Image (cartoon, rainbow, N blue to C red):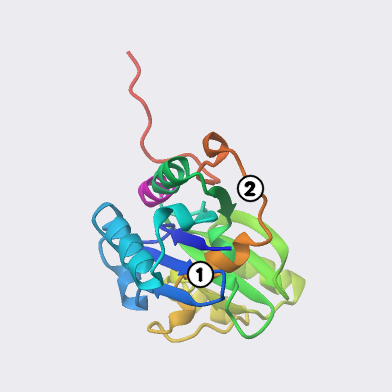
């Protein structure tokens, strides 16, 4: 299977093409990119084109397109999901939605893993995994509430993601270990999106939607 994987749940755009022979061609953002202004509209398709060129694949050779559906940043998720849906429609490749939090936890060498994406408003999107299996399903909460839950359940995980970096103090006080801010552990990788696609069910294009968890800040104006 030739798989294209993309994720835009954070401020960074992550892309990977994994060929059927196992070779992977990836644009992996730096951890520093997580604190910069998002630029998915400008970055995503050039990164996709670069990975396709590096993999020496034509669009018609794609078998699957996997996309991180969040939870994460509202605008970023909309861009990523819309791009994946458009490419799937154009190429005929299967579309497979993947949890961005599961992808964040995927490459980590230890367990349990607490994946945390900054949700703004002083909150985080969080999920806990042990041996790649979800122990806590994705939810949104204040970091103090996450820390309290860790203490109540006696769990001391490795905490990764931009949410872990931002709220390091509360998490470390609860017994979590947080890698240094520049660690690649905090980045959602396109390669992880590709890997998780193997276990994800294909979905109709119109059924793949961002997993926001909570309502966006912007609300429609009423007359």
Vertical placement of residue 15 versus 202, above or below: below
Percent of width and height locating residue 216: 43, 40
Q: Quadrant of the N terminus?
A: bottom right
Which residue in the protein does label 2 denote?
A: 202
User: In terms of depth relative to the viewer, which is nearer, 38 or 4?
Assistant: 4
* Disc 2 residue crowd, few under 14, some 14–19, many 20+, Cα 10 Å: some
Percent of width and height locating residue 10: 40, 61
Which label's residue is closer to the chain start, 2 or 1? Answer: 1
- Identify the magenta region: 74-81
Q: CA distance from mark 2 to mark 1?
A: 17 Å
Residue occupying the point 41% across, 64% down? 57
Residue occupying the point 54% across, 65% down? 194
Q: Which mark is residue 18?
A: 1
- Where, by quadrant of the figure, is residue 199 drawn? bottom right
**Residue 173 visible within the image:** yes
Q: Main secondary structure of the magenta part?
A: helix
Say whether residue 173 is left or right of residue 6.
right
> Magenta includes 77?
yes
Q: In this rendering, which labeled residue sits more in front, label 2 or label 1?
A: 1
* Disc 1 residue crowd, few under 14, some 14–19, many 20+, Cα 10 Å: many
Say whether residue 53 is left or right of residue 209.
left
**Would you say the residues marked 2 and 1 are in contact, meaning their CB atoms lie under 8 Å apart?**
no
Vertical placement of residue 86 versus 101, above or below: above
SS class, disc 1: strand
SS class, disc 2: loop
Residue occupying the point 59% across, 68% down? 195
**Residue 38 visible within the image:** no
Say whether residue 219 is left or right of residue 172.
left
Percent of width and height locating residue 79: 36, 47
Say whether residue 191 is left or right of residue 120.
right
- Where, by quadrant of the figure, is residue 109 drawn? bottom right
């Amino acid at each position: 299977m030739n798989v294209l994987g993309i994720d835009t749940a954070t401020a960074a755009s992550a892309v990977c093409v994994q060929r059927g022979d196992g070779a992977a061609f990836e644009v992996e953002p730096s951890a520093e990119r997580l604190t910069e202004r998002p630029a998915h509209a400008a970055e995503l398709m050039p990164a996709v084109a670069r990975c396709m060129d590096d993999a020496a694949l034509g669009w018609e050779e794609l078998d699957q397109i996997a996309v991180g559906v969040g939870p994460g940043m509202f605008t970023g998720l909309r861009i990523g999901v819309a791009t994946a849906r458009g490419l799937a429609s154009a190429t005929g490749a299967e579309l497979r939605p993947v949890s961005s939090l599961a992808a964040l936890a995927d490459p980590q060498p230890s367990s349990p893993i607490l994946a945390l994406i900054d949700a703004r408003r002083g909150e985080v999107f969080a999920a806990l995994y042990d041996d790649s299996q979800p122990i806590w399903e994705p939810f949104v909460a204040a970091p103090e509430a996450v820390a309290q839950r860790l203490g109540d359940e006696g769990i001391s995980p490795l905490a990764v993601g931009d949410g872990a970096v931002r709220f390091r103090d509360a998490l470390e006080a609860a017994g979590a270990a947080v890698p240094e801010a520049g660690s690649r552990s905090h980045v959602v990788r396109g390669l992880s999106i590709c890997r998780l696609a193997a276990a994800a069910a294909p979905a109709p294009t119109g059924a793949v939607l961002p997993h926001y968890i909570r309502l966006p800040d912007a609300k429609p104006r009423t007359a």
